[in-house]
């Protein structure tokens, strides 16, 4: 699973509520991963989702250019399949170069919205 020079992060808690107080993009309930690549080479990212009662989905792929940041919503992932709503999942993120990963959830099912954010924990690096 892990390539030479690859860093791997595990985010064991994922969930995208299907409900939102608004369909405005900023207010739709979502999960996001924010990547910072401060290095001198592009980072190829692979994301695999794991579930309690079904086979994993992935990998989803994206590139974080060198000395750049990418903010990606799990809601927007469609290839190889859309991320299911109202379903618990875990994420495994693999990067070909060192990057920082921050995970965020906006739950806007109620007018008093909740925002959760954490920096992902790198589980392996070679």
Image: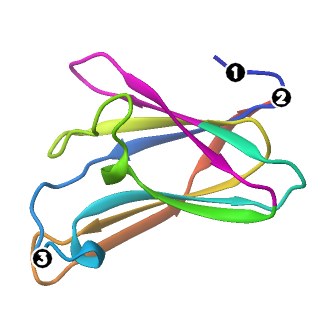
Tell me, for residue 112, which label it has, or none: none
Tell me, for residue 22, which label it has, or none: 3
Residue highlighted by disc 1: 2
Residue 59: within the magenta? yes
Q: Main secondary structure of the magenta part?
A: strand
Query: Label 3, label 1: how many angstroms apart (C-alpha)?
Result: 40 Å
Q: Residue at x 30, y 68 (%)?
A: 106
The C terminus sits in image quarter: top right
Q: Is residue 93 above or below residue 37?
A: above
Residue highlighted by disc 2: 126
Front tag of 3 and 2 = 3
Q: Is residue 69 left or right of residue 21?
A: right
Q: Is residue 118 left or right of residue 18?
A: right
Q: Look at the numbered discs 1 and 2 and tell me whether their residues touch, using CB distance below 8 Å.
A: yes
What are the residue bounds of the magenta stretch?
46-66
Q: Residues within 10 Å of mark 3 (few under 14, many from 20)?
A: some
Query: Label 3, label 2: how many angstroms apart (C-alpha)?
Result: 43 Å
Q: Is residue 8 left or right of residue 31?
A: right
Expressed as whole percent of the image width and height from the top left, the position of residue 32 reads 42, 58
Q: Is residue 46 above or below residue 27?
A: above
Q: Nearer the viewer, residue 38 or 61?
A: 61
Q: Is residue 23 above or below residue 87?
A: below
Q: Nearer the viewer, residue 46 or 17?
A: 46
Query: Label 1, label 2: how many angstroms apart (C-alpha)?
Result: 8 Å
The N terminus sits in image quarter: top right
Q: Secondary structure at mark 1?
A: loop
Q: Residue at x 36, y 21 (%)?
A: 56
């Amino acid at each position: 699973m892990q390539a030479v020079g690859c860093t791997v992060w595990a985010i064991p808690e994922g969930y995208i509520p299907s409900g939102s107080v608004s369909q405005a993009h900023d207010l739709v309930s979502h999960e996001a991963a924010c990547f910072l690549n401060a290095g001198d080479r592009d980072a190829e990212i692979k994301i695999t989702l794991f579930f309690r009662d079904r086979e994993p989905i992935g990998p989803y792929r994206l590139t974080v250019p060198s000395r750049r940041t990418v903010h990606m919503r799990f809601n927007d992932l469609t290839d190889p399949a859309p991320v299911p709503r109202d379903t618990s999942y875990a994420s495994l993120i693999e990067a070909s170069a060192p990057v920082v990963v921050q995970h965020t959830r906006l739950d806007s099912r109620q007018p008093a919205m909740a925002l959760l954010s954490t920096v992902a924990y790198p589980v392996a690096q070679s």
